[in-house]
Image: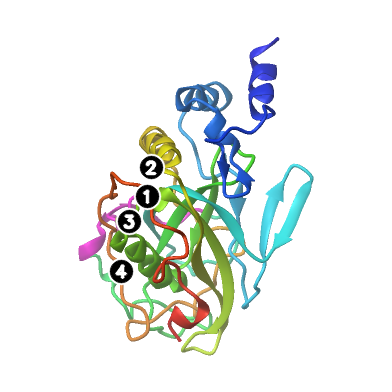
């Protein structure tokens, strides 16, 4: 049997107690993390890029469905379920307003902290990261940032061995921060739960409809499953940290950014938390956000 057939056979093996979360099987829990890294190295041959992974474009105009790539083609879904195995903040700046094309940004901060390009430098000291520096589609000044902040989420879905990339726009960062802080208040790292990401329709101060993210917990992993995803986080993290920041196709256009009065600037989230005892039940209150939690 070839190495490729062995990998396919491993995914098709019968479910195990470790691989089943709730009523759903996660194929990655049947694989050794070292083998997954070997597969990435053999198939990609170098560092991962944003375009190497399956990506979900962010819906526009208040659309409440994601378009998810599958082997059979694209599928429209109301929400995405998966374990967030890694996340990071990024920034992108376009001197000419982003028009939805694949043109690269003039300045990009893959870590959300240090920009490379024009103007480059520390993002915390950059005037383009100040609220009120942005422009609307009609060229008028907006209350948002010229260099907007986004967050890349890398989700492992049932049946998949590699993560899918979902990039949150500025208007969804506050809801994401609330969700991760609620997990932290339960001493749970973000990769200790199955997260459901949904969509709700909202309107910016400029009168533009946009799609905002909602977050909730579907299942809480067992201690053994959490240990497995902790290992994946540590082994996949260095590769995923190198994924370049890009504006996703279908991303929000200027004018739908939050302003300082409705959206606090997200801070770089703190270190991952661990917990020695068994994870709490998934029905504990305070975990997850609903549309009513999102800013108006």
Q: Is residue 246 magenta?
A: no
Q: Which of the two labelled residues, at mark 2 and mark 3, occupies the earlier sequence position?
A: 3
The numbered mark at residue 112 is 3
Q: Are marks 1 and 2 in contact (CB under 8 Å)?
A: yes
Q: Is residue 238 visible?
A: yes
Mark nearer the viewer, 3 or 4: 3
> Which residue bears the numbered disc 2?
241
Gap between marks 2 and 3, in whole Å? 11 Å
**Dot 4 lies on which element?**
helix
Residue at horizontal 60%, vertical 35%?
27
Q: Are marks 1 and 3 in contact (CB under 8 Å)?
A: yes
The numbered mark at residue 110 is 1
Q: Which of the two labelled residues, at mark 2 and mark 4, occupies the earlier sequence position?
A: 4
Please count the marks in the image: 4
Mark nearer the viewer, 2 or 3: 2
Gap between marks 1 and 3, in whole Å? 6 Å
* Residue farthest to the right, as pictured: 72
What range is drawn magenta here?
A: 104-125
Quadrant housing the C terminus: bottom left
Residue 91's spot in the image, x, y percent?
A: 38, 59
> Which residue bears the numbered disc 4?
129
Mark nearer the viewer, 2 or 4: 2
Quadrant housing the N terminus: top right
Q: Which of the two labelled residues, at mark 1 and mark 4, occupies the earlier sequence position?
A: 1
Residue at horizontal 28%, vertical 44%?
276
């Amino acid at each position: 049997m070839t190495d490729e057939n062995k990998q396919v056979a491993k995914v098709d093996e019968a479910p195990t107690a470790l691989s089943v979360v709730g009523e759903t099987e996660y194929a990655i829990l049947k694989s050794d993390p070292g083998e997954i890294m070997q597969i990435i190295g053999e198939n990609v041959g170098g560092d991962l890029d944003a375009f190497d992974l399956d990506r979900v474009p962010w819906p526009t105009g208040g659309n409440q469905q994601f378009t998810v790539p599958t082997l059979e083609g694209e599928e429209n879904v109301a929400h995405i379920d998966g374990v967030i195995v890694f996340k990071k903040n990024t920034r992108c700046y376009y001197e000419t307003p982003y028009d939805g094309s694949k043109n690269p940004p003039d300045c990009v901060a893959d870590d959300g902290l240090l920009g490379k390009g024009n103007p480059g430098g520390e993002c915390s000291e950059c005037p383009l990261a100040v609220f009120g520096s942005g422009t609307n589609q009609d060229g008028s000044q907006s209350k948002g940032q010229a260099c907007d902040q986004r967050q890349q989420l890398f989700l492992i879905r049932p049946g998949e061995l590699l993560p899918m990339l979902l990039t949150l726009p500025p208007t969804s960062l506050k809801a994401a921060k609330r969700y991760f802080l609620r997990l932290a208040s339960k001493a749970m790292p973000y990769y200790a739960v199955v997260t459901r990401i949904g969509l709700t329709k909202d309107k910016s101060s400029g009168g533009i409809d946009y799609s905002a993210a909602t977050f909730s917990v579907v299942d809480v992993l067992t201690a053994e499953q959490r240990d497995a995803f902790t290992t994946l986080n540590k082994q996949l993290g260095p590769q995923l940290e190198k994924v370049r920041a890009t504006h996703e196709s279908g991303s929000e256009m200027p004018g739908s950014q939050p302003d300082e009065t409705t959206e606090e600037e997200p801070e770089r989230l703190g270190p991952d938390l661990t917990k020695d005892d068994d994870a709490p039940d998934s029905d504990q209150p305070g975990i997850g956000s609903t549309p009513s939690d999102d800013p108006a």
